[in-house]
Image (tube, grey):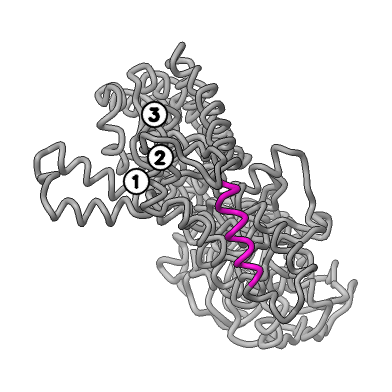
Amino acid sequence: MGTVNYADLAHQIVDRVGGEGNIATGTHCATRLRLTLKDAAKADTAAVQKLPGVITVMQAGGQYQIVVGNNVPKVYEELTRFTKLGSDDASAPTDAPKGNLLNRFIQLISAIIQPILWPLAGAGLFKAFLSLATNLHWLDPTSTTYAILNASSDAIFYFLPIFLALTAAKRFRANTVTAMAIAGALVYPAVVELASATGPVTFFGLPVVMMSYTSSVIPIIIAVWLQGYLERFLGKVLPDAIRNFTTPLITLVVMVPLVLLTVGPLTTYAAKGISAGVNAVFVFAPWLGGAILGGFWQVFVLFGLHWGFVPVMMNDLATQGHTLLGGPLVAAVSAQAAATLAVFLRSHSAKRREVAGPAALSGLLAGITEPAIYGVNLPLKLPFYFGIAGGAVGGAIAAAGGSANDAFVMPSLLSLPAYMNVGNFTLQLIGTAVAIVIAFALTLAFGPREEKDAEAQESAAETGTPVAASTGDAIVTAPVAGTSVPLAEINDKVFASGAMGQGLGILPADGRVVAPVSGTVIAATKTGHAFGIKSDDGVEVLVHIGIDTVQMKGEGFTSQVTRGQRVEQGDVLALVDLDAIQRAGFDPTVVTIVTNSASLGTVDAVTGRTLAAGDPALLIMAGAPEPVNA
């Protein structure tokens, strides 16, 4: 698979979803670019899915989600270079689609948590390994070395409200620095000490119910939401001469006491109530809760619903130091990754194995399963189901032992140290192992065994000699000079799948495209980018110049033939401006397909070669191939 140009990909995504004007908000998660479109009907989903580097596209949680994989931050970074997405003024417009309450909640949590997800995950893994080091007596927890390392790993969690204030302010169109100042007041040392004060705490005589806001989530989000309304009101009523400094002054004077008096206690108690309700299942029937969450976690990921659990988990970590909801997740993630690994070993498709290998490692070691789900398991169906089965059984075992993580981590094999201190760690390991074995064994035994793709058809090209010539055989020549590539490597899922027939692609060295066979032109597009020819011996050949170049509407293409015209092999079909194709952002690969190859016999492609126009490229054999001298 070729290297993806992320700058080009970002531009093409924006163009194909209706332009920047159609994007209300944009963010990204571990593997997905998440866009909120003003009008989803303007998006050309089929075109987006064909872009090199895009695994699939789905719409869920009120978002248009483009699955890219682990390199999605690179795409988002490029996207923010030429759009307002990610900037301070990239606030959520009022004309963005609202959706139902659940979708809006999931979208909100996703937008606020996503920018700090990877630092949280990295710091959480840091804490897990630090805990492992102390449990194994490699590090003295009373030493100054431990104090420094612990501060490095714990700071982002202790001061979490400040980080959330930054991301929430962008979401709610509030001043980011003022929001961080409000959060800073909540975790200010003197205020933190008031939470453990023995005497009453009052504010101008009003009683204040104090609690610790370190590591808290919901209070600051609600506070910044209210801050946005207050600032917009002040912006309307304050005189221009004093607005810039009096707005933050009044906001701080109002919001900090308001949060301590009302918002903080109310939201904290509400969060504790929700957490208690969810955790009740794990208390009364832990195996059932583990089976449900372990089995359906990847389904939740599929629809983006897993973000609804994040506030509950983070609240658990802040209030009780661990979260039972995390116990079954290592089994859930590892099972899907194990099923993908089995596909890698079982499939005969080189293209599928190329995706499955890295995706399996990403799931097992990093806890990122979207490439495995969308690129492998879900298209094949059975591996996805087997992963669910393994996750359910393994999750039930882990939860039965009361397993929980005491740090925010991405569930994976590398994050297992975060599960050592709560519950039965042995059952966590057994549950994870059982999940892996079930998913791997079922997929290996009963999963689909795909046929070989274009990679298996390169034997003729390896010797550099054409294959030919028993009765009924035919040769299709290269329609353009350039480097030949296997059909499976073409950046178009339809062509690459072989659904239209067998063939190859050529990265053109010039813009002179000629007839690959002698026969009749049976199709000639007005845009000059595609031609169909039926040869004298019945071979039907499609020559398609560039990927998605129909969108250029003929610009840069000069057709030389018309439908019904007789052509000889080597006659010019079209003259093409390759620079124009590249300037327009399209792939110039010339695709040559034998559209009736299924009825002709074996089609061998000469790939990995530098060909001149007219050189043998596709070798069609009705019987067994016989090598002949070139």
Query: Mark 2 or 1, which is nearer the eye?
Result: 2
Query: Mark 1 or 3, which is nearer the eye?
Result: 3
Residue 399 x, y percent position in the rendering = 39, 21
Query: Mark 3 or 2, which is nearer the eye?
Result: 2
Q: Amino acid at mark 2?
A: Ala
Is residue 25 one of those drawn in magenta?
no
Specify the quadrant of the image occupied by residue 304. Answer: top right
Q: Determine the secondary structure under disc 2.
A: loop
The structure residue drawn at horizontal position 55% and vertical position 26%, both measured from the top left corner, is 273
With respect to residue 308, does 533 lie above or below? below
For the stretch drawn in magenta, the main secondary structure is: helix
Disc 1: which residue: 365
The magenta stretch spans which residues? 246-259
**Mark nearer the N terminus (2 vs 1):** 2
Total marks in image? 3
Disc 3: which residue: 327
With respect to residue 299, does 472 lie above or below? below
Q: Determine the secondary structure under disc 3.
A: loop
Q: CA distance from mark 2 to mark 1?
A: 40 Å
The structure residue drawn at horizontal position 49% and vertical position 31%, both measured from the top left corner, is 447
Q: Which mark is residue 242?
A: none
Q: Is there any visible trace of residue 426 in the rendered image?
A: yes
Disc 2: which residue: 195
Residue 136 x, y percent position in the rendering = 12, 38
Q: Are marks 3 and 2 in contact (CB under 8 Å)?
A: no
